[in-house]
Image: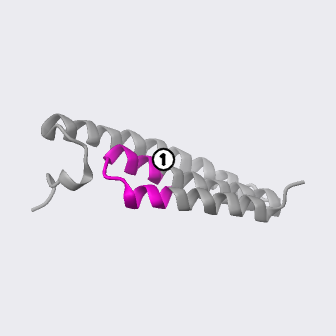
Amino acid sequence: MIGLSSYLVLAALMFSIGLFGVLTRRNAVGILLGIELMLNAVNINLVAFARFHGDLLGLVFTLFTLSITVAEVAVGLAIVIVIFRVRRTVEADRLDLLRW
C-alpha cells in the first residue's frame, strides 16, 4: 500500500511544476494551465488526507474546489478569448488592457 508521504511528494511535485509554469510562461493559456496544475495538487492533498484520516470532509472540499476550478477555467478562457479578439495576442507581457 502506498503511504501518505508518496501522495504528498506527488502533490508537491505537481504544485512546483505548476508554479514554474505560472512564473515562466508568457502565454496566458500556459499561465492558466499552470494554475490548474497547482489546484489539482491541492486536490490530491485533500483526497490523500481524507483517505488516511478516514474522513469524508476532504472529499467534500475536493468536490467544492473542482466546481470552483471549472468556473475559473470557463471565466479565464472567456477573458483570454476576448483579449485575443481585441489585441490579437495572448502574451501576458503585452496585456495591459486592464491597467489605469
Image quarter hosting the N terminus: bottom right
Q: What stretch is highlighted in magenta?
A: 18-35
- Is residue 71 a member of the stretch shown in magenta? no
Front residue of this view, candidates 95 and 42: 95
Disc 1 element: helix
Position of residue 16 relative to residue 79, above or below, is: below
Query: Quarter of the image holding residue 24?
Result: bottom left
Based on the displayed image, in which of its 4 quarters is residue 86 positioned? Answer: top left
Residue displayed at 62% across by 63% down: 12
Main secondary structure type of the part rendered in magenta: helix
Q: Which residue is drawn at 77% across and 60% down?
A: 6
Q: Which amino acid does label 1 sit on?
A: Thr
Q: Residue furthest left?
A: 100
Is 55 on the left-hand or right-hand side of 59? right
Residue beneath label 1, please? 69
- In front of the other: 79 or 65: 79
Q: Does 40 appear above or below 78?
A: below
Q: Where is residue 2 in the image (x, y as percent from the top left)?
A: 85, 56
66 lies left or right of 88: right
Percent position of residue 68, x then y: 48, 48
Q: Quick one: 60 or 94, which is closer to the camera?
A: 94
The foreground one among 65 and 36 is 36
Residue 4, image x, y percentages: 79, 63
Picture coordinates of residue 61, whole percent (x, y): 62, 55
